[in-house]
Amino acid sequence: MSNRPISEDDLHAYIDQALDATRQAEVEAYLAQHEDVAARVAGYRRDRDLLRNAFAKVAEEPVPSRLNVEHIAARQRSAKRQPLWQMAAAAMVLLVAGGGGGWVLHGQMQGSEVTAAQLTPAGASGIVALASEAADSYQVFALDHFRPVEMRADDGDSGAAFIRWASDRLAHPVQVPDLAASGYRFMGGRIVATAHGPAAMLMYDDDKGVRLVMLTRPMKVDQNTAMTGSHRGDLGGYSWADKGLGYSVVAPLDDQVLHPLADEIRRQLGSDV
């Protein structure tokens, strides 16, 4: 048996019976020693069974005739035979509406200049952009129970393979802070694309399944910036930059819990700001 920590992914895979025999035995042994986690897993299983029972009859129903492939094809053929005068009338309506709407917008925008940066979040830069990218990464990957990370942390190398890969992709040394003393295990990471180049995403989780993400990438602006807080919904975040590298830590935690974690990460990284 390995000493690899039991993650939230393992628990969901255990419920779905998707683990190999060795890992299943490890999860069962872990649950036997952690009653609170076992109770949570039992709740997950009840929720799964309730959903299955609720939609069992729907799953057995025949496909509605309107969704039949032949009926869909017939409707498409009928649409293609639409009379020319109907298409011309529709085009005229769009032209009038578009012209009027455009003129109204023109009147509203006179005297003000709107740049692309004001119209899209991609126009943000520096620490603001980094914080947004970290929150985006959390919402996309941390909520994924099947493959939240591209490279998992192995017991033998403590994520050394990921560190080498990420450092090579970013052309900067990437460090993996050790948050075990705070109750968070390093799950692994992946490289994510941003409007400002590749970034390394590191993911952690605790025994309750709460996940924490740290995003780091080279900074073109705000290369040395003191730590600042941010929020998006229930996600809290702290971001800073030191010696040309930016860091952003996000998690669904209160500030009084997340702030010390961010401080510990800064301490381990040797940040001067």
Image: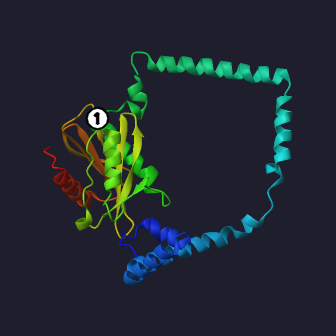
Q: Relative to the observer, which residue lies in front, 78 or 12?
A: 12
Residue 52: image location, x then y, percent: 64, 70
Q: Residue 265: horizontal and vertical position, in percent?
A: 22, 54
At which x and y percent is residue 119?
43, 29
Question: Label 1 belongs to which residue?
Answer: 126
**Image quadrant in which you'd find residue 220:** top left
Instruction: Examine the rendered structure and indicate whether residue 172 appears above or below residue 5.
Output: above
* Of 21 and 238, the residue lying toward us: 21
**Picture quarter with the C terminus:** top left
Using the rendered view, name the quadrant where residue 125 is placed. top left
- Residue in view at x 19 percent, y 50 percent: 269
Measuring 35% from the left and 52% from the top, which residue is drawn there?
162
The answer to whether residue 239 of the structure is visible from this angle is yes
Give left or right: position of 185 versus 59: left
Residue at image location 38% in from the left, 30% down from the top: 123
Q: Amino acid at mark 1?
A: Gly
Whether residue 214 is visible here, answered yes or no, is: no
Disc 1 secondary structure class? helix
Snapshot colouring:
rainbow
